[in-house]
Image (spheres, rainbow, N blue to C red):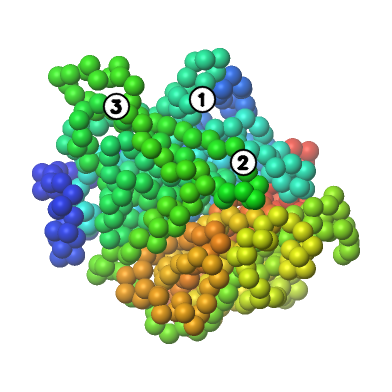
Amino acid sequence: MQRNQTKSQTMWSRSLPGVAAAVVFFLSTMALPAAAAVVEHTFVVSQMNMTHMCKEMLVTVVNGQLPGPTIEVTEGDSVAVHVVNKSPYNITIHWHGVKQRRNCWADGVPMITQRPILPNHNFTYRFNITGQEGTLWWHAHVSYLRGTLHGAFIIRPRHGSSPYPFPKPHREIPIIIGEWWAMDLTKAERDLTYYLADDDPSASTINGKLGDLYNCSGVAEDGYVLDVEPGKTYLLRVINAALFSEYYLKIAGHKFTVVAADANYVSPYTTDVIAIAPGETLDALVVADVAPGRYYMVASPNQAPKPDPQHPVFVTRATVQYNNKHNHSNNGDVPVAPEMPYQHDTMTSFYFHSNLTGLRHSQRPPVPAQVDERLFITLGLGSVCRKGDSCVRGDSNDSITVATMNNVSFQLPAATTPLLEAHYYNTSSMDDMLQELPGRPPMAFNFTDRALIPTGPKELRLEPTSKATVARRFRHGAVVEVVFQSTALWQSDSNPMHMHGHDMFVLARGLGNYDAARDVDRYNLVDPPLKNTVLTPRVGWVAVRFVADNPGVWFVHCHFDFHLTMGMAAVFIVEDGPTQDTSLPPPPTDYLTCGHNLVPDEFYLRSTKTEVPDKSGV
Ligand code: C2O
């Protein structure tokens, strides 16, 4: 839906040094707010044939588009998205990063906040956008299928005609980094769930295009082209929608000025390389200020070095192309290519993330000084027996590799009621279904000892692992501090930890083992960035703080899909406060009330190909 907005360019047609002045202007202006609107979309989820690299695939998409439609709203608007499920899969859509205050019902997590939408059924998501601006995104919350069911979610400020705390860009462009899978995503998920195979994508993509590093019988794949005019400033709204990898993004010859992350403003940070993990979003200004010509925009994944398991690295590139009306001669040239960080360079990502600070502005909430509850959560791999309690674990056919938080791998309860509904109606069975997420790991050891990386007898002693529906309850308003600690158990991946319904202040991060006596002094309590997805560095830790003030049942999980599918997840239950204003209202009248088929082991994907869907939820 296109909104009418006053475009006043002239005031801000200045270059980046104007950022500081713009901040001041932003803070001092509160022009007349535009009237709130209802932004309505219909999302038809269906399957479609697409051909890349000479291979035709049936892919599941929204409205025949990949990436799916962009939702554009103004802060204060209401959103209604009518989802029509014409795919053979059970679907939910999650509005990644939208806080959904007192509206957990619309959060879109199957069997946690709602029953999934069955094939040939519909459901309407309704929610308000308040107190957030910047770039977010939406995606199916049926793991793996989100690889092709996703799109940008853009929230523009409501105030005035020069709304940003930085010079108004000439154009705004979503840059969605994704993957192309030349295999059925539901099969890839099944392979991993049952630990039958470890599949890989076939290419990386920028805005759905593979780019000229890929071809079909020698004919290069299309790449995304960004046309720019010399001297103009562009706002790139960068989203990592990939299932598997952190990416570096560079544009040859150009610099980025990062101005927001996860729809929260950051102090302008100028860099020639962006690092972005799955689930993260970044807003970055780029000025077309070099010699007119063609420049590659490259996205390249990074991965932990050996002895971590190695995966093929798929680089993708788009082109930034200067439109010079008087001179087209550049357009035939080979674009200039940037030099990308090495695939095993994980430190550039560490420094990039550590360099972000929150922008100080009047609407920014202060960092709570008093902490009510502290959790220390280790992230890593482990194994559970395929059958029964005892088996040969580790790299054996009798066991399944799982991913854990404090050695517990999340599984959905074998119940027919979503957790949120059970919570709201105070169902007594709720407590039988849940196990408390431990506040610390069962054993302390050198979590980041690289000698733990390949699996072996020592690792098996350190990873006594179980499966459970792990949850942690918080009193309304509790200030919670969480230290996420990546471990080197079996592998040493980073872990982009995403929390639904809340943003977290990122107080500090470090390499090695977290040590409170040393590290608390390093907390940034002045201007930490606010994030919904926090990258826990590989062989390192990150400390966050958040206020549990949004009542509901919120999923917390790693945004690497293989980790999520393997169970690196938990739920945070935020209790109601003392007043109606601080309590969760009843479910919407059209909340799906029945009709799903739960196979506890397949906790996201529930193919209903062989089922006859009932009529509920239409
Ligand atoms: Cu973007 Cu629970 O996910």
Which of the two marks, 2 or 3, is nearer to us in this view? Answer: 2
Residue under the image location 79 percent in, 57 percent down: 394
Residue under the image location 47 percent in, 79 percent down: 518
Contact flag, marks 2 and 3 (Cβ < 8 Å) = no
**Left of 464 or right of it: where is 95?**
left
Q: Nearer the viewer, residue 427 or 484?
A: 484
The label shown at residue 214 is 1
Q: Which of 31 and 209 is in front in this view?
A: 209
**Left of 380 or right of it: where is 229?**
left
Ligand 1 occupies quarter: bottom right
Q: Callout 3: helix, strand or loop?
A: strand
Amino acid type, residue under disc 2 in the picture: His
Q: Say if disc 1 is inside 8 Å of ligand 1.
A: no
When the figure is inspected, residue 460 is found, relative to residue 432, above or below; the finding is above
Q: How far apart are marks 2 and 3 (CA)?
A: 31 Å
Density class for disc 1 (Cα within 10 Å; few <14, some 14-19, many ≥20) is many
Residue lying at the far front of the rendered structure: 451
| Residue 270 percent across, percent down from the top left | 27, 52
The label shown at residue 71 is none
| Residue 351 percent across, percent down from the top left | 40, 58
Q: How far apart are marks 1 and 3 (CA)?
A: 19 Å
Tell which circle, 1 or 2, labels the residue nearer the N-terminal end.
Answer: 1
Mark 3, residue position: 294
